[in-house]
């Protein structure tokens, strides 16, 4: 069985090597869809009976390990030295430094890796992360699937 939870967050970025508008500092209302697979829990009397995982628990985990870190942060490539120095000069600025350009594709892969660890089989029902879809805009997104990089 597969279940999916959608969440949203706001973040800034720039693609320093881009030939067009995305080379400028800007932000997005990102959306992320998290798809998990697992067996439906059949144990009598447990809170998760009839579920793969409670959707509120899916949200709580993603919120704590990913969304809270990226929401209202500036996602910056470590090689974007001028912007990184600028951001570091702003006291208490929320900056996330990445080893790769903060493209939708790279962010989807990073999110998959972070969430994959967080959702390790929590209930003994073979729970695992299968898919992360990261929306940069309502019309543009990147997909990261288990086993397909």
Image (cartoon, rainbow, N blue to C red):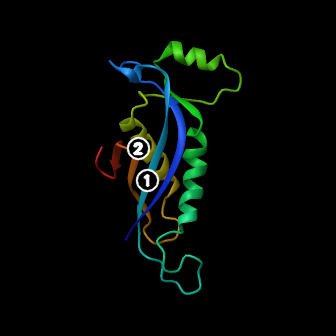
Vertical relation: 59 (above or below) 143: below
Q: Which residue is mark 2?
A: 135
Q: Quadrant of residue 113?
A: top left
146 relative to 90 in the view: left or right: left
Tell me where residue 31 appears, x and y as whole percent. 46, 46
| Residue occupying the far left of the picture | 148
Secondary structure under the numbered disc 1 in the rendered image: strand
Residues at marks 1 and 2 touching, judged by CB atoms closer than 8 Å: yes
The 10 Å Cα crowd at callout 1, few under 14, some 14 to 19, many 20 or more, is some
How busy is the neighbourhood of tag 2: few (under 14 within 10 Å), some, or many (20 plus)? many
Q: Residue furthest top?
A: 82
Q: 141 and 138: which one is in front?
A: 138
Viewer-closest of 129 and 117 = 129
Name the N-terminal-most of marks 1 and 2. 1
- Please tell me whether residue 76 is drawn above or below residue 34 in the rendered image: above
Q: Quadrant of the N terminus?
A: bottom left
**Would residue 34 be found to the left or right of residue 123 on screen?**
left
Instruction: Determine which residue is flagged by label 1.
Output: 33
Circle 2 SS class? strand
Residue located at (48% from left, 64% from top)? 121
Q: Position of residue 49 (x, y in %)?
A: 52, 80
Judge by depth and name the residue closer to the eye, 144 or 120. 144
Q: Position of residue 119 (x, y in %)?
A: 50, 58
Q: Is residue 96 left or right of residue 19?
A: right
Image quadrant in which the C terminus is located: top left
The number of callouts visible is 2
């Amino acid at each position: 069985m597969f279940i999916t939870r959608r969440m949203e967050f706001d973040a800034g970025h720039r693609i320093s090597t881009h030939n067009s508008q995305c080379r400028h500092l800007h932000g997005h209302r990102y959306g992320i869809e998290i798809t998990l697979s697992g067996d439906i829990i059949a144990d009598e009397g447990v809170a998760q009976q009839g579920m793969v995982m409670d959707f509120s628990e899916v949200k709580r985990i993603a919120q704590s390990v990913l969304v809270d870190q990226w929401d209202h942060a500036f996602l910056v490539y470590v090689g974007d030295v001028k912007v990184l120095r600028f951001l570091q000069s702003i006291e208490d600025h929320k900056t996330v430094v990445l080893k790769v350009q903060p493209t939708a594709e790279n962010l989807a892969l990073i999110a998959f890796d972070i969430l994959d660890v967080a959702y390790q089989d929590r209930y003994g029902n073979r729970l695992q992360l299968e898919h992360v879809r990261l929306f940069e805009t309502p019309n543009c997104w990147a997909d990261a699937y288990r086993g397909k990089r």
